[in-house]
Image: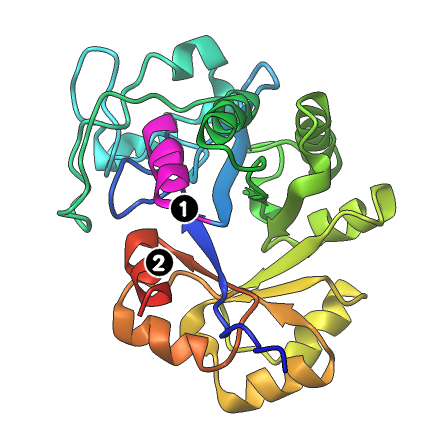
């Protein structure tokens, strides 16, 4: 009689591995891949010249970035460092790797700039080949919201067009799941590429039914803040056969609690902690 392998969710490295290396940088992504993550999660924004840049905020965050002259970005002025109003050449001159993130004392800093999405994928594919593993799947979050249109990012249609073109150019569309809080982006993506896996990100306490009704269809993945997970929500998801990947789960006790719900994956800043549970 064949034995059933024990359940373990996919390990999604959040912004690479934010707890260990500077977030959304090449060092973080490459370190996460070396650790053995199953999926790389990252965020994308758009520069003034239409480049797809890997960054959580569409500005230079005062928590992690320094100006080309080596000064910390002023928290009171960080929104003025609007990436959508900067060329990529200008963006690349800022360092976002040396400043110690105040919430992640274990993070090892090193010089790092905000890379292009295509640059990240090429580097990951090269390392995966060296490690003898298949190209790593990607979870790409489009950082779009209604009041940000044409201020911090292009319209949803243009934003999606640029991201899909970039993914297609490096042959990564077939291993990408597109994530977004902005339902407009997911609605457009479903029309544009019906086969592309989509994940609706959720951070509020509105019901699953409300979110799906507003979206207008059932995505392949539901992505709630892990603190929203309850037995009732999980039962609703299971009844719909809707996979879910909660975020951002960093403490081993929380990881164990979430794993008891059998999620598709777990997104974490500390993939080393989650991977350690796999060997227990």
Q: Is residue 169 left or right of residue 195?
A: left
Of residues 67 and 217, the one nearer the viewer is: 217
Could you give the CA–CA distance between mark 2 and mark 1, rounded to whole angstroms? 8 Å
Of residues 203 and 230, the one nearer the viewer is: 230
Dot 2 and dot 1 residues touching (CB under 8 Å): yes
For residue 34: magenta? yes
Query: Visible in this render: residue 152?
Result: no
Task: Mark 2 or mark 1: name the one nearer the start of the chain.
Answer: 1
Q: Badge 1, how many Cα within 10 Å: few under 14, some, many 20+?
A: some
- Residue underneath mark 2: 275
- Residue underneath mark 1: 36
Of residues 117 and 11, the one nearer the viewer is: 11
Q: Residue at x 44, y 75 (%)?
A: 259
Of residues 70 and 9, the one nearer the viewer is: 9
Q: Main secondary structure of the magenta part?
A: helix
Q: Is residue 9 above or below residue 12?
A: below
Q: Residue at x 69, y 54 (%)?
A: 198
Q: Quick one: SS at disc 1? A: loop
Q: Is residue 224 left or right of residue 101?
A: right
Indicate the quadrant where residue 55 lies. Answer: top left
Q: Badge 2, how many Cα within 10 Å: few under 14, some, many 20+?
A: some
x then y, percent, for residue 41: 49, 45
Q: How many marks?
A: 2
Magenta-tinted stretch: 26-37
């Amino acid at each position: 009689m064949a034995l059933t392998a024990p359940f373990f969710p996919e390990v999604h490295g959040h912004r690479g591995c934010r707890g260990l290396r500077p977030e959304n940088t090449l060092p973080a992504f490459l370190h996460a891949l070396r650790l053995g993550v199953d999926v790389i999660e990252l965020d994308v924004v758009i520069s003034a010249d239409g480049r797809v840049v890997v960054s959580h905020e569409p500005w230079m965050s005062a928590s992690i970035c320094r100006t080309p002259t080596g000064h910390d970005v002023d928290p009171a002025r960080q929104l003025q460092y609007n990436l959508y109003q900067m060329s990529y050449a200008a963006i690349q001159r800022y360092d976002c790797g040396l400043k110690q993130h105040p919430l992640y004392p274990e993070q090892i800093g090193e010089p790092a700039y905000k890379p292009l999405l295509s640059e990240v994928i090429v580097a990951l594919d090269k390392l995966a080949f060296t490690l003898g593993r298949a190209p790593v799947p990607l979870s790409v979050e489009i950082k779009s919201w209604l009041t940000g249109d044409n201020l911090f990012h292009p319209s949803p249609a243009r934003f999606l067009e640029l991201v899909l073109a970039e993914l297609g150019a490096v042959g990564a569309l077939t291993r990408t799941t597109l994530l977004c809080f902005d339902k407009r982006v997911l609605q457009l993506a479903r029309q544009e590429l019906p086969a592309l896996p989509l994940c609706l990100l959720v951070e509020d306490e509105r019901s699953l039914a409300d979110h799906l009704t507003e979206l207008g269809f059932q995505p392949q993945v539901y992505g709630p803040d892990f603190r929203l997970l309850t037995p009732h929500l999980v039962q609703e998801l299971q009844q719909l056969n809707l996979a879910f990947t909660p975020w951002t789960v960093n403490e081993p006790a929380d990881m164990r609690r979430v794993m008891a719900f059998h999620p598709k994956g777990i997104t974490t800043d500390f993939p080393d902690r989650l991977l350690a549970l796999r060997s227990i």
